[in-house]
Image (cartoon, rainbow, N blue to C red):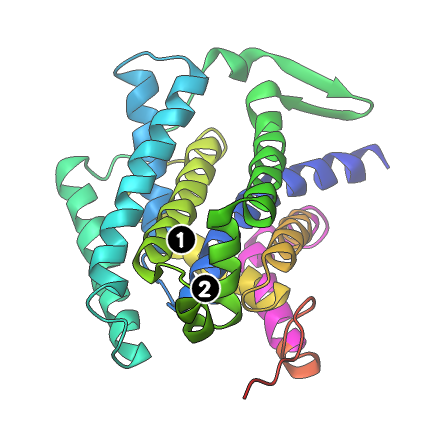
Amino acid sequence: MDLFLQYLANGIVVGSSYALVAVGLTLVFGILGVVNFAHGEFYMLGAYAGLTAITVFHVPLPVAVAAVIVVSALLGWGAEVILHGPLKNRDATSSIISSFGLAVVLQNAALIWIGPEPQLLQTSLSAIPVEIGPVFMPLQRLMLPIATAVLLVALHLVLRYTWTGRSLRAMAQHGTVARLCGVRIKRVAIVTFMVAAALAGVAGFLMSSVYMVHPLIGNMIVLKAFTVVILGGMGQIGGAAAAGILLGITESMTSAYLDNGLRDIVGFVIVIVVLLVRPNGLFGRKADRS
């Protein structure tokens, strides 16, 4: 039982990162209808931004998180300029192909300027053990689910109670009607990309203490994020958060009780099964629009 709880905690830590990345991805798709395959590069560059802030500039962890949010948000703004601004009135495949191109450009830029050597974040928090009953983990890892919960609650409050949040929700429900009601489409698109990139960047930075950081880590994380988005239901923010945690736990249990080599496969098997049984995802709702 003790080992089960430890694996469960490990799964929640990893699943928290999936939730953050997937929420950003589904936010962009749900509001703007853009399938962004460069989203994994926000994760990768956020990790490098945090590593640079701590190892080069020796700033405290909260300042590093703030720096990651700023850098990632600026990247998101740049992605909106490339992927959505000039292509919003064209076929959806144009933005998909452009996002592939942007991902390749960012990966190769990171390989040239940073190099292929993997890096791992080690801070003073890594040496502080936290013991909760039979569960043990460093404080640095425990911060990931805590930070995820704080960010998702903050996002919910912004979407629910601010004018910007209402604009985002109006765009998600019907872009044309939102425009007629005075919603500024360009500003909504920029805010959406900036928020999505910031969530992915923070996830990458926090996970840099768990997994090695290298220029290609965005490839797998974006596939996992798409798996989570499909499981949670396309455009469903709450569904993406729940499905991210669920996928993390499933992978952890698979590694523990079956085979570590199967952990990256099980998620894709589950998504195939779910699509056969519930095409709208576990938490998705069928919607017919005129």
Q: Give the range drawn in magenta.
A: 253-274
Helix, strand or loop under label 1? helix
Q: Name the spot of residue 223 as percent of width and height, x first.
A: 45, 61
Helix, strand or loop under label 2? helix
Q: Which amino acid does label 1 sit on?
A: Thr
Position of residue 276 relative to residue 182, above or below, is below
Q: What quarter of the picture does the N terminus occupy?
A: top right
Mark 1, Cα crowd under 10 Å, few <14 / some 14-19 / many 20+, is many
> Majority secondary structure of the magenta segment?
helix
Calculate the distance from the C-alpha at mark 2 to the C-alpha at mark 1. Answer: 8 Å
Instruction: Identify the residue at horizontal 51%, vertical 50% (top origin).
Output: 165
Q: What quarter of the picture does the C terminus occupy?
A: bottom right
Point out which mark residue 192 bears. 1
Instruction: Identify the residue at horizontal 65%, vertical 83% (top origin).
Output: 276
Point out which mark residue 71 bears. none
Point out which mark residue 31 bears. 2
Q: Which amino acid does label 2 sit on?
A: Ile
Q: Is label 2 in contact with label 1 (beta carbons under 8 Å)?
A: yes
Nearest the viewer among 208 and 281 is 281
